[in-house]
Image (spheres, rainbow, N blue to C red):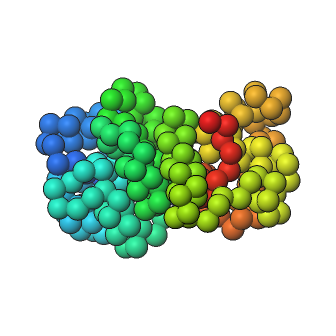
Amino acid sequence: MPPRPDHEGAAPTPVRILVVDDHPIWRDAAARSLDEAGYQIVGTAGNGAQAVRIAVATRPDVVLLDLNLPDMSGAEVTRRLLTELAGVRVLMLSASGERQDVLDAVTAGASGYLLKSAEVAELVDAVRSTAAGHAVFTPSLAGLVLGEYRRLAQSGQEPAPKSPAELPTLTERETEILRLVATGLTYPQIAARLTLSPRTVQNHVQNTLSKLQLHNKAQLVRYALEKGVDLGY
């Protein structure tokens, strides 16, 4: 059962999930799969307004949120959830891998973006990673977002992004690890690529979070994308 931290000395409690999708069959299937994986389903919703009401009442750890809802966009729902609930994490689900859809979700504050074509095991792992504060963001989708920022910068709609060398206070190693975190690699994957231990990678990430005054890997990914860190695409 996927636990979340509780008060010291108390038994861990299951991660609490709210599932939001306007298609009842998909919504019920996702909720059932997560329940069978050991998560606590605190509710389901079929539109954005209902999702916000239920989230405020139940205070889930993770909201599994459809991008396209009948009353408002997933990006707007994400903004409202983050305003109402400190610490809630949003994992966006969509059939679309279009650049603007991904960009809208990330800039609204979503911790991750998963395509609906994902297998059940991928969904379960994505929710687990999101609950742990990680960014669930595949390299291909990270490339889409970075490409959009570059396009806006070239068209004059956005200031030109900073190069990694211009990022303040970060060492060369921290910037290198920042790039790899932003592409969606795990600590062990980064450690293998750089010939470091996972603990060393984790320490570098924590130092980077502290320097940038960020709180988790999801915010670190958004920082990298917003600053135009070169992910190698």
Which residue ends up furthest to the bottom in the rendered image?
A: 84
Which residue ends up furthest to the front in the rendered image?
A: 155
Residue in view at x 81 percent, y 54 percent: 165
**Percent position of residue 106, x then y:** 46, 55
**Percent position of residue 129, x then y:** 51, 42
Image quarter (top left, top right, bottom left or bottom right) of the C terminus = top right
**Percent position of residue 230, x then y:** 68, 45
Determine if residue 2 is in view: no
Determine if residue 157 is in view: yes
Residue 54 vs residue 91: left or right?
Answer: left
Residue 208 vs residue 100: left or right?
Answer: right
Residue in view at x 34 percent, y 69 percent: 80
Q: Who is closer to the viewer here, 180 or 103?
A: 103
Q: Who is closer to the viewer here, 115 or 41?
A: 115
Q: Is residue 88 above or below residue 99?
A: below
**Percent position of residue 12, x then y:** 50, 50
Residue 210 vs residue 43: left or right?
Answer: right
Q: Is residue 92 above or below residue 167?
A: above
Residue 70 vs residue 143: left or right?
Answer: left
Image quarter (top left, top right, bottom left or bottom right) of the N terminus = top left
The total of numbered circles placed on residues is: 0
Quadrant in the rendering for residue 122: top left
Residue in view at x 55 percent, y 40 percent: 143
Q: Is residue 214 above or below residue 94?
A: below
